[in-house]
Image (cartoon, rainbow, N blue to C red):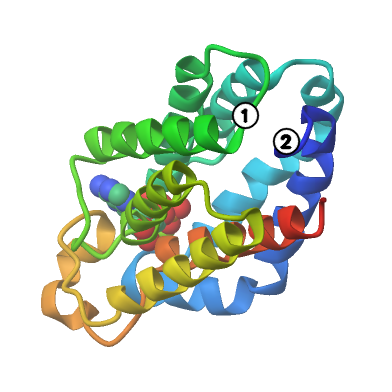
Amino acid sequence: MLVAPKMLPNVVTLLYDTILENADELEELDRILGDGDHVVNLLRGLEVLKTKSGDLVAVDWPQAFQFIGMSLMSSVGGASGSLYGTLFLKMGGALKESELTTNRMADIFSQGVDAMKARGKSDVGEKTMLDVLVPVAQCLVQLSAEGVERRVLLATVSKVAIDGVEATREMVATKGRAAYLGSRTVGHVDAGAKSSQLMLCALTGFLAGDD
Ligand code: ADP
Ligand code: MG
């Protein structure tokens, strides 16, 4: 098992702190390429999850993912709220067993990211969070199928996420608010890609220390 749902409150707090620590940079990115509310949106959602920690520990993995999805959907707002909500709702629906293994995580995360693509009518190369999440999903599926050692898998996921953010710098945004700015978006990384990477790297760090 990766972590038990009872560890989720710690993960939520970690993600909240991670976004807060990087708030200035993220806010600036969304101010340049969007409307500047990305940090406020994420912190609102994570804050609600923090206050509902008691509900998270009382359920199994499929229910926990569904709960997180519904909560994010209704509290985050903005494009990122419906996209992250979709990710977790799909993961919860796709997970048929109460126990979470690395292979199952790779499979349901991949299905969740596919659902985000459908929801956002978007794909890699459009300067969004999908430029981090799609390669991470592909990497997870590949490495878990190969049965690579857990620490290697976590380190590789972090690297793929960081490379994904950096790749958005030279892209022209074609989805979301940034699309209105067209070629003027070149030279800046996408706020959603950056926040996804920061949260993923915080999570891999947490899991690496959770043997
Ligand atoms: P909003 O754009 O509604 O203000 P946020 O600021 O919270 O919402 O989130 C913006 C981020 O959402 C962007 O940086 C981008 O990564 C992501 N995003 C926006 N639209 C899409 C889309 N259609 N598909 C995938 N990701 C998107
Ligand atoms: Mg915004």
Count of marks, rendered view = 2
Q: Residues within 10 Å of mark 1 (few under 14, many from 20)?
A: many
Mark pair 2, 1: CA separation:
7 Å
Along the line of sight, the residue nearer the viewer: 195 or 7:
7
Which residue is drawn at the image coordinates 45% and 51% (left, top)? 143
Classify the position of ligand 2 by quadrant: top left, top right, bottom left or bottom right: bottom left
Identify the mark at residue 194; answer none if there is no mark: none
Question: SS of the residue at dot 2?
Answer: helix
Mark 2 vs 1: CB contact within 8 A: yes
Where 101 falls versus 188 (above or below)?
A: above
Quarter the N terminus occupies: top right
Q: Residue furthest top?
A: 96
Left or right: 200 with respect to 129?
right
Could you say which is closer to the camera, residue 2 or residue 46? Answer: 2
Residue under numbered circle 2: 49
Percent of width and height locating residue 9: 82, 39
Question: Residue 81: x, y in percent?
Answer: 47, 40
Relative to residue 133, is residue 9 depicted above or below?
A: above
Task: Name the residue tied to disc 1.
Answer: 68
Query: Which residue appears at 58% of the width and 34% of the height?
Result: 75
Residue 79 x/y as whole percent: 37, 45
At 80% from the left and 50% from the top, the residue drawn is 13
Disc 1 residue type (three-letter): Ile
Q: Amino acid at mark 2?
A: Leu
Residue 25 or residue 60, whichever sits in front: 60
Direction from residue 48 to residue 25 in the image, left or right: left
